[in-house]
């Protein structure tokens, strides 16, 4: 699966958020979710 610049990437198991970091580096938007609250709290971004 591929995306173009400006498109949105979804990562349902964000973990350490590697996918989100790469998405930003490649001019993509991203949506990430994580089932483990201990993990997701570390990467919370205020809106």
Image: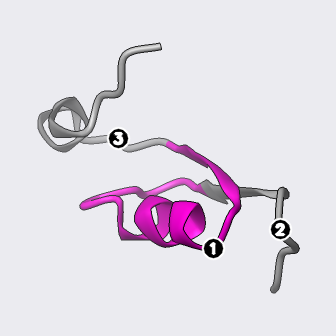
- Which residue reaches farthest top? 47
Q: Residues within 10 Å of mark 2 (few under 14, many from 20)?
A: few
- Which residue reaches farthest bottom? 1
What is the C-alpha distance between the residues marked 3 and 1?
26 Å
Point 43% across, 58% down: residue: 13
Estimate the x, y position of residue 8 in percent, counting from the top left.
77, 53
Q: Is residue 8 depicted above or below 21 in this figure?
A: above
Point 55% across, 60% down: residue: 24
Determine the secondary structure under disc 1: loop
- Label 3 close to label 2 by CB (< 8 Å): no
Q: Is residue 28 magenta?
A: yes
Mark number, residue 5: 2
Considering only order in the chain, which callout, 2 or 3, is on the residue closer to the N terminus?
2
- Label 1 close to label 2 by CB (< 8 Å): yes
Determine the secondary structure under disc 2: loop
Mark number, residue 26: 1
Q: Which residue is mark 3?
A: 35
Horizontal placement of 32 versus 5: left or right?
Answer: left
Point 36% across, 69% down: residue: 18
Nearer the observer: mark 3 or 1; the answer is 1
Estimate the x, y position of residue 42 in percent, counting from the top left.
15, 37
Way the structure is coloured: one colour
Tell me the magenta residue range: 11-32
């Amino acid at each position: 699966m591929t995306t173009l610049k400006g498109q949105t990437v979804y990562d349902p198991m964000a973990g350490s958020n590697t996918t989100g970091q790469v998405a930003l580096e490649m001019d993509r938007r991203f949506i990430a979710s994580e089932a483990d609250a201990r993990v997701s709290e570390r990467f919370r971004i205020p809106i």
